[in-house]
Image (cartoon, rainbow, N blue to C red):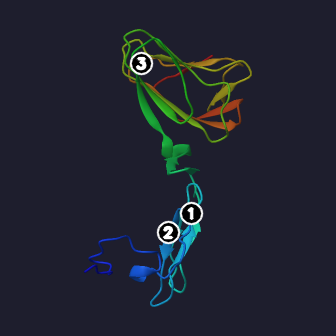
């Protein structure tokens, strides 16, 4: 004799059997139930999650980015990444030239003098750093139309800042998008050109 219960069923149950309480479920819906009430489907959009409350059913929502956070939602994925200074990363440079990327620092390990070139496009607040390690030091090179202010000594347009000792370092910030940069901190006697 065949039985029809949720634990021991030799044939498939309909959606209204086994306590679900819905006749035709919504495709891709997440079921939410409360006590003896029928289950209700909530359909999530691309990159959405369920956010709960204390007084009602959870709802479909997207995450909101805070300061220095970027959130990208896509079908089946949510990517959270730091931006601004929170995304700062150090890179070892073994060659003699390096194109800088915003919010990156460069440890100069080549025995020859290494040139680090600031990008032509930098948002206000973008930061860069160069740390000497190789014996011949480094040159921080600006592009045409860009100047770097080292205290009250600015570089010329497309000028540079050069280390004089192996362990010299500099940390700079873009103060006017794409064009004007300022030294926040430095170690050593740096040459402005």
- Disc 3 crowd rating (10 Å Cα; few below 14, some 14-19, many 20+) is some
Q: In this view of the protein, can residue 164 be seen by the observer? A: yes
Residue 174: image location, x then y, percent: 64, 36
Q: Nearer the viewer, mark 2 or mark 3?
A: 2
Q: Disc 2 to disc 3, how far (Cα)? A: 63 Å
- Look at the numbered disc 1 and give the secondary structure of its residue: loop
Residue at x 54%, y 25% (from the top left corner): 100
- Disc 1 crowd rating (10 Å Cα; few below 14, some 14-19, many 20+) is some
Above or below 138: residue 172: below
Sequence-wise first label, 1 or 3: 1
- Look at the numbered disc 3 and give the secondary structure of its residue: loop
Q: Which residue is mark 3?
A: 165
Residue 90: image location, x then y, percent: 42, 32
Q: Nearer the viewer, residue 172 or 32?
A: 32
Q: Disc 1 to disc 3, how far (Cα)? A: 58 Å
Quadrant in the rendering for residue 172: top right
Q: Disc 2 to disc 1, how far (Cα)? A: 8 Å
Disc number for residue 44? 1
């Amino acid at each position: 004799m065949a039985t029809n219960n949720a634990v021991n069923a030799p044939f498939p149950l309909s959606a209204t059997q086994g306590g679900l309480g819905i006749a035709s479920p919504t495709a891709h819906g997440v079921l939410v139930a409360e006590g003896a009430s029928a289950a209700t489907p909530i359909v999530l959009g691309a990159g959405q999650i369920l956010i709960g409350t204390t007084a009602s059913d959870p709802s479909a929502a997207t995450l909101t980015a805070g300061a220095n956070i970027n959130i990208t939602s896509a079908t089946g994925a949510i990517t959270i990444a730091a931006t601004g200074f929170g995304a700062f990363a150090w890179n070892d440079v073994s060659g003699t030239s390096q194109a800088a990327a915003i919010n990156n620092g460069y440890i100069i390990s080549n025995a020859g003098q290494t040139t680090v070139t600031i990008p032509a496009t930098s948002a206000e607040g973008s930061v860069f750093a160069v740390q000497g390690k190789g014996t011949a030091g480094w040159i921080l090179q600006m592009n045409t139309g860009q100047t770097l202010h080292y205290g009250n000594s600015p570089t010329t347009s497309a000028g540079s800042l050069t280390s004089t000792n192996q362990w010299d370092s500099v940390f700079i910030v873009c103060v006017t998008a794409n064009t004007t940069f300022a030294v926040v901190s430095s170690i050593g006697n740096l040459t402005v050109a």
